[in-house]
Amino acid sequence: MIDFNCDMGEGMGNDESIMPYITSANIACGYHAGDKDMMKQTVELCLKYDLAIGAHPSYSDRENFGRSEINISPEQVYILVKEQIQLLKKITEEAKAVLQHVKPHGALYNRSAKDVQVAKAIAEAIKDVDEDLVLFGLSGSYSITEAKNLGLKTRSEVFADRTYQDDGSLTPRDQPNALIVEEEKSIQQVLQMVNEGTVTTVSGKRISIMAETVCIHGDGKNAVQFAKRFHELLKKPIRF
């Protein structure tokens, strides 16, 4: 069974409905969504459903849900990410839970995938909080390579509900066809990524990809239905 993660604690109202069908939760740390109370509630739900708990740090950008690029230095990114991880780590410790991983959110995630200095700053922040934390990052990106360079454990992430460009990056949300809304199309993409180690880009090209954890977005229109279908699909033997 492959790891199946979802962004949580963002105020979508469907977290508990999705949790029975996933294995890892990335909890918003209050900078793009959520707050301390919501973080505590989400941690408690993760314990209830036996989910791996991860921090989901972002730019300080609640107005745009963390999806707008903000021009700050790698040094500022380091401080920003470290603060958010520490905040959730404290909450997990109070709940006698374990913080397992870190997955940057939105524009920060996309920037770290292509900006080596930002990727390094995020990896350093993670390591300085807890060197046992796992970095979830875009497959084939600087996020993964820089974390590995620092000795961190990583999981290469792929997306069930996003389309890909020829360079392996995600199609920006402001472009046409960035999101996959058709359930069967999403399922076929996941099967291809997991079974074949490839993904078909928006131009029709097949590129290599490593799928160690699959993400679906909790704010998607059909998030609960998608999660249930993928759970039924991926709990079956996967051909590698």
Image (cartoon, grey):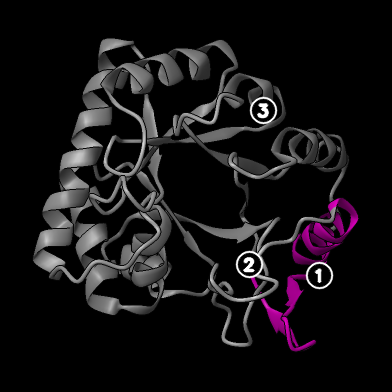
Cα–Cα gap, marks 3 and 2: 24 Å
- Eye-nearest disc, 3 or 1: 3
Could you tell me the amino acid type at mark 2? Met
Residue position marked by numbered label 1 in the rendering: 196
Q: Residue at x 25, y 59 (%)?
A: 122
Task: Decide: is 91 above or below 154.
Answer: above
Quadrant for the C terminus in the image:
bottom right
Q: Under tag 2, what secondary structure?
A: loop
Whole-percent x, y for residue 172 in the image: 53, 73
The picture quadrant where one finds residue 207 is bottom right
Q: Under tag 3, what secondary structure?
A: helix
Cα–Cα gap, marks 3 and 1: 27 Å
Tag 1 near tag 2, CB within 8 Å: no
Q: Is residue 124 left or right of residue 15?
A: left
Indicate which disc residue 214 carries: none
Residue stretch rendered in magenta on the structure: 183-210
Q: Under tag 1, what secondary structure?
A: helix
Indicate which disc residue 210 carries: 2
Cα–Cα gap, marks 1 and 2: 9 Å
Q: Residue at x 77, y 55 (%)?
A: 181
Q: Is residue 132 left or right of residue 164?
A: left
- Eye-nearest disc, 3 or 2: 3
Task: Decide: is 43 above or below 56.
Answer: above
Whole-percent x, y for residue 104 in the image: 37, 53
Question: Magenta segment: does it hold 211?
Answer: no
Tell which of 89 and 38 is nearer to you.
38
Tell which of 40 and 5 is nearer to you.
40
Could you tell me the amino acid type at mark 1? Glu
Circle 1 packing at 10 Å, graded few (<14), some (14-19), many (20+), is some
Quadrant for the N terminus in the image:
top right
Tell which of 91 and 131 is nearer to you.
91
Could you tell me the amino acid type at mark 3? Ile
